[in-house]
Amino acid sequence: MNRWLLGLLLGLSQVIWAQAPTQEVVLSASAGSKLGIAVPSPQVAGIGEGQAKRDFHDVLLRDLEEAGPFAVLKDRQPKAADASGVKAWVEAGADWLVSVKLGRPVVEGADRVARTVGDELEVVAQVVDVKSSKAIFTKKYRGKDAALGRIAHSLSDDLVARLTGEKGVAGTRIVFVRQLSPLIKEVFQVDRDGSNVVQLSHHRSLTLSPSVAADGRLAYMTYKGGPPEIWGQRRVAGAFERLFPSKNGPQGPCMAPAWSPDGKRMVFVQGDRRGNTDIMVLDVESGRARRITDSNCINTEPSWNPAGTQIAFTSDRGGTPQIYLMEDDGSNVRRLTVEGSYNASPSWSPTGAMIAYVSRFEGKFDLFVYKLGEGKSYQITTGVASSESPDWSPDERRLVFSSGSRGGMQLYATDLSGNTLRRLTDFAGCQSPKWTRSR
């Protein structure tokens, strides 16, 4: 394979390079530190119990189970759905009791007759500390029938925030690429639990490598105009337009964009006639770009640290693809991965403490995490199909990635132990997921 084709494939499908395995450990918190939470079935009015269970209660239970700090009670629950039997709830293992009333809000018209409001729903949640018998949280949510799942996400995130001080991730979303036909891929968005699939781009072309800014702006590479270009939004909710190359600027195929944490810059990859690819940094407002790598090799897959001062990337400058780090001006280049011969697709964690990447082991590709404070790598996935393109949840507790055979790739999420693996999609052709709060 010539160098030009290799560089192009790196941008198109994020070809996964890998490393030999290192120690496998559990990085997640122990179950013993979790707070027991009971969530009886909601009291419903004006809506079917089946719908309330399917669209709200089941979603809320799943969100709380996956949130991390809670141990959700499922068995031995007292009959009372409130805190009247405090002793029984304590004996059942509950610390918190979540009571929910779900129904249609009632308003009084000019004729003083009370009526429900169309398809509007009201959810009133109260949390009681059963050991003190005191209410510690009360909140009212409103939305239409179709929004029940997202109301459940919001309640879960609010409960996580009440306990930990940091909002949960149940209401977050994942942006990804989906193949619609052999020559058409578009950017889509899905809720964190795999629901509410929405198409974001409509170029009817190969559209790849999405990146989401902190304010929700989207960028990606697309072939809509011929050679691959970087397109995206200059303003929040703005139209998609070409960001690079400009008409009068240097030309060449561009790929793998990634917004800087402050949203003012963008790092991306540009190829040249020699078959090399180098990393560029674009000032989005001015449109000026500068090259920060310049070597006779493939440099690709850049990922910012949270401070916007360093960039992780993949390079074969040492003979085989490995993960490297450099400052945001291209200085102080140093190699991160030292074991194995194939490592790629770095993704810097939200706090900057870890970098996820992919590695080949026993004939397939798995996820690894490099802990910068320890200088060690840990294997996350085992026993699943080849895994690609890891990205972090905003709370740094999970990874989203694509996995499966070529053409049959699905999105999955896992905790850092690798023990809680969940498939998010039920359609083929998914790749390049990005987990975000901002959309």
Image (cartoon, helix red, strand yellow):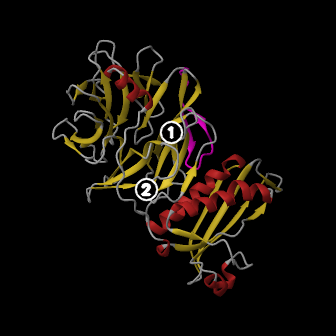
Q: Are marks 2 and 1 in contact (CB under 8 Å)?
A: no
Report which residue position mark 2 lands on.
Answer: 395
Q: Secondary structure at mark 1?
A: strand
Residue 191 within the magenta-colored segment of the rendering: yes
Residue 262 position, x and y percent, is 32, 41
**What is the quadrant of the N terminus in the image?**
top left
Q: Amino acid at mark 1?
A: Val
Report which residue position mark 1 lands on.
Answer: 175
Q: Residue at x 69, y 70 (%)?
A: 40
Q: Amino acid at mark 2?
A: Asp
The reply to whether residue 52 is in sight is: yes
**For this view, does 347 lie left or right of residue 101?**
left
In the image, farthest residue toward the left: 332
Residue 348 position, x and y percent, is 34, 47
Which of 413 and 166 lies nearest the eye of the viewer? 413
Which of 262 and 372 lies nearest the eye of the viewer? 372
Q: Main secondary structure of the magenta part?
A: loop
Q: Is residue 43 above or below residue 54?
A: below
The reply to whether residue 350 is in sight is: no
Span colored in magenta: 188-204
Q: Residue at x 23, y 26 (%)?
A: 290
